[in-house]
Image: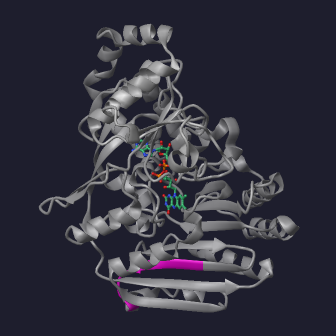
Amino acid sequence: MVHLCQLLVLPLWASTGWAAAIDRRRDTRSTASLDTCLADAVGGEDARVQFRDEADFNTTDVKPFNLNLQYQPVAVLYPQTTAETSAIVKCASLYDHKIQARSGGRDFINKCIGGDDNAIVVDMKYFNKVEVDNTTGIATVGPGQTLKALVNGLIDNGGRYIPHGSSPTVGVGGHLMVGGMGLTSRQNGMSIDVLQEVEVILANGTVCRASEYENSDLFWAMRGAGASFGLATEFKFQTKPEPEEIVSFSYNFTSSNLTVLGEALKAYHEIMRDPQLSRKVGITSRFTAASYILTGAFSGSEADFDALKLADRLPTMSTSTVLPGLSWSQFMNSLFNDAGKSNDAGYFYTNDMAVTPETIPSNSSIDSFISTLTSGGEDAQGWSFLFDLFGGAMNDTPENGTAFPHRNSIYFLTAYTRTAEKTPATAIKLVDDAVLSLQNNKPENYLGYAGVPSLSYGDEAQQKYWGSNLARLETIKAALDPNDIFSTPQGVKPSSSS
Ligand SMILES: Cc1cc2nc3c(=O)[nH]c(=O)nc-3n(C[C@H](O)[C@H](O)[C@H](O)COP(=O)(O)OP(=O)(O)OC[C@H]3O[C@@H](n4cnc5c(N)ncnc54)[C@H](O)[C@@H]3O)c2cc1C
């Protein structure tokens, strides 16, 4: 049985006249009355409700991140309060329109603008609070913050931090909906693992608090599949004092011969499969046509970092840099500054895979990956493959502990191609073929991270993102959002059996 919001949902749908009201409005609905409802929801302030027939709507309000996917929403709204946001969600339900929140707008397939045409988009930019309770260390954070603003806000509020990803422009809202992992996740888990409570607006407009103790089914679903269940307006995180010192490191291999780079990739796989590897170390690595670069962070002293002997486990490098004794703020500023162009809108395509100790690619799969890319010819432009080490504390939570199912994973691959114009099918095929080579042509053995969604998944997307947790998610969805108002093509759909 699903316990949700003190069963606010069922009485509202069933007995307060809400369902009858929806039926009446559906009978008489028109674009004009939807527009009026939305305008009323933000107090009739023109600047905070933009419709698709307005000038500059696409460039100023829709602002697609992936330029390959030019979806057309019906409206973009900028609420300033929870009450306004609830009123917008009620309009979506009354007029049977899909609705999605946008926090940072950094989803690879533009889910925040609906992932399809005709959605209502709720931009959360005014929800930008960061406050820390100095006694408990609990931070209250708005979803409209970017990760960069979150990091700075926590540092300024008593030198605190939480685990999160490495991209400055990613929004807190969307990050929490998928998981949120980064260079300290092997030590601290994911952003969702330190989430204590979330305020959510449900499909019927109800404002609901969810935690382990209150509406726990909703809390479970929000941690990994949240965008299908409601609109988050506030998060409460357990923060920690920032690390005393960080060692930042970078190992660079430069060659136009991919086979040479492949030897470093194989050595890195040996490091990633080591169950004894310290949790204090986090590594991301980028494999491109000209170089393979491993960068990372170690939380501790230079002497303790040296004792890991990481460099000794890799082939001879072109260059290397080790910077010990950094403050958290120094390290994060340099990480965010290096994040580069991948944060800007552009034409791109992604594929990915979650890798467990049982499915880690063998050296022969890596050889096959290298030969696929080598034979890519002209299409071997613009691609990059990120091999990000995880495991550690991320694996301390059971697979069914949150909606995020990848608790047995030790690394995630983000396969990516970015092109100057619309991404051609040949470039997409090269990326897909390279991923298949790493998978030894057995894609069925691999799940994918909802934070790196891929259009390659087709009808299997939900199974790929949520694996064994999908059935429970579908049941909760049927209870909370039976008409699939919080909808994207790859989102959780309501189970038909509930
Ligand atoms: C350049 C880049 C680097 C990345 N690096 C990492 C990384 O290091 N680690 C990692 O874990 N992930 C990473 N990601 C993935 C990232 O965490 C997800 O794409 C995340 O969903 C983006 O959040 P957003 O708020 O910017 O996205 P948006 O596009 O605003 O939203 C993405 C989805 O979440 C929903 N959503 C947004 N806000 C809310 C809300 N308040 N309530 C309910 N639903 C909401 C949207 O409706 C949409 O479906 C990266 C992505 C990019 C583009």
Is residue 135 inside the magenta stretch? no
- Name the one closer to the observer, 192 or 421: 421
Task: Name the colour scheme.
Answer: one colour
Q: Is residue 343 left or right of residue 34?
A: right
Question: Residue 443: where, in percent of width, then height?
Answer: 71, 49
Q: Is residue 437 left or right of residue 479?
A: right
Q: Residue at x 31, y 34 (%)?
A: 84
Q: Within the image, what quadrant is residue 465 found in? A: top right
Is residue 295 inside the magenta stretch? yes
All told, the count of numbered labels is 0
Question: Residue 104: where, in percent of width, then height?
Answer: 45, 53
Part of the protein shown in magenta: 294-302
Question: Residue 178: where, in percent of width, then height?
Answer: 47, 49
- Name the one closer to the observer, 247 or 17: 17
Q: Is residue 118 above or below residue 366?
A: above
Q: Is residue 44 left or right of residue 317?
A: left
Q: Within the image, what quadrant is residue 409 found in? A: bottom right
Dominant secondary structure of the residues highlighted in magenta in the image: strand
Q: Residue at x 56, y 88 (%)?
A: 311
Q: Is residue 4 above or below residue 140?
A: above
Q: Residue at x 60, y 49 (%)?
A: 453
Question: Residue 246: where, in percent of width, then height?
Answer: 37, 82
